[in-house]
Image (cartoon, rainbow, N blue to C red):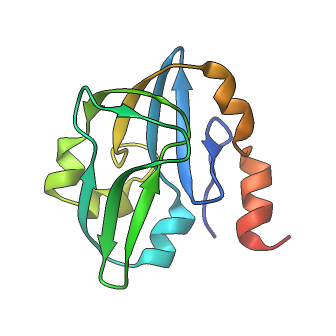
């Protein structure tokens, strides 16, 4: 059974966001990783890039598929996780810890209200 930490918010496209003040850490959920299978490649926005809520900021490739990665909030990329870009298997090993993709300085903290809580996301993916 997958874990969906309570301190995160989620999109129905399986990205998560962790807010720390105005800084958002973004990655993908354990459910998404299980659906993708072995992850072989990750491409995300560069530091300094502006990303927009609901828009693609990267792609993730597995042995099964190539999927877009969408932004849960709008803002400016302030950090990229080069470790997971160099070794995409880290995403599967620790999706909510070391497996994050980017950190963003959020433009509008109110956008987080449009995301799903842990319980809402669990109900969505487990069909409850």
Looking at the image, which is closer to me, 85 or 65?
Answer: 65
Residue 10 falls left or right of residue 56: right
Quarter that holds the C terminus: bottom right
Residue positioned 19% across, 53% down in the render: 85
Looking at the image, which is closer to me, 61 or 19?
Answer: 61
> Residue 73 appears in which quarter of the rendering?
top right
> Among all residues in the image, which is located at the extreme left?
86
Figure check: 117 above or below 28: above
Figure check: 56 above or below 32: above
Quarter that holds the N terminus: bottom right
Image coords of residue 27 (percent x, y): 44, 48
Image coords of residue 79 (percent x, y): 27, 29
> Among all residues in the image, which is located at the extreme bottom?
64
Looking at the image, which is closer to me, 51 or 34?
Answer: 51
Residue positioned 68% across, 40% down in the render: 6
How many numbered tags mark residues here?
A: 0
Residue 39 falls left or right of residue 22: left
> Among all residues in the image, which is located at the extreme top?
21
Image coords of residue 127 (percent x, y): 80, 73
Looking at the image, which is closer to me, 85 or 69?
Answer: 69
Residue positioned 50% across, 31% down in the render: 74
Residue positioned 41% across, 62% down in the render: 68
Image coords of residue 121 (percent x, y): 72, 55
Figure check: 79 above or below 54: above
């Amino acid at each position: 059974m997958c874990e969906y930490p309570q301190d995160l918010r989620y999109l129905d496209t399986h990205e998560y966001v962790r807010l720390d003040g105005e800084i958002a850490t973004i990655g993908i959920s354990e459910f998404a990783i299980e659906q993708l299978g072995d992850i072989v490649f990750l491409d995300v926005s560069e530091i300094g890039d502006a990303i927009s809520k609901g828009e693609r900021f990267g792609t993730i490739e597995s042995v099964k598929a190539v999927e877009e990665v969408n932004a849960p909030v709008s803002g400016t990329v302030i950090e990229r996780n080069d470790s997971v870009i160099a070794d995409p298997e880290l995403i599967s090993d620790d999706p909510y810890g070391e497996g994050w993709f980017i950190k963003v300085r959020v433009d509008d903290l109110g956008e987080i209200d449009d995301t799903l809580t842990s319980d809402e996301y669990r109900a969505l993916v487990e069909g409850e």
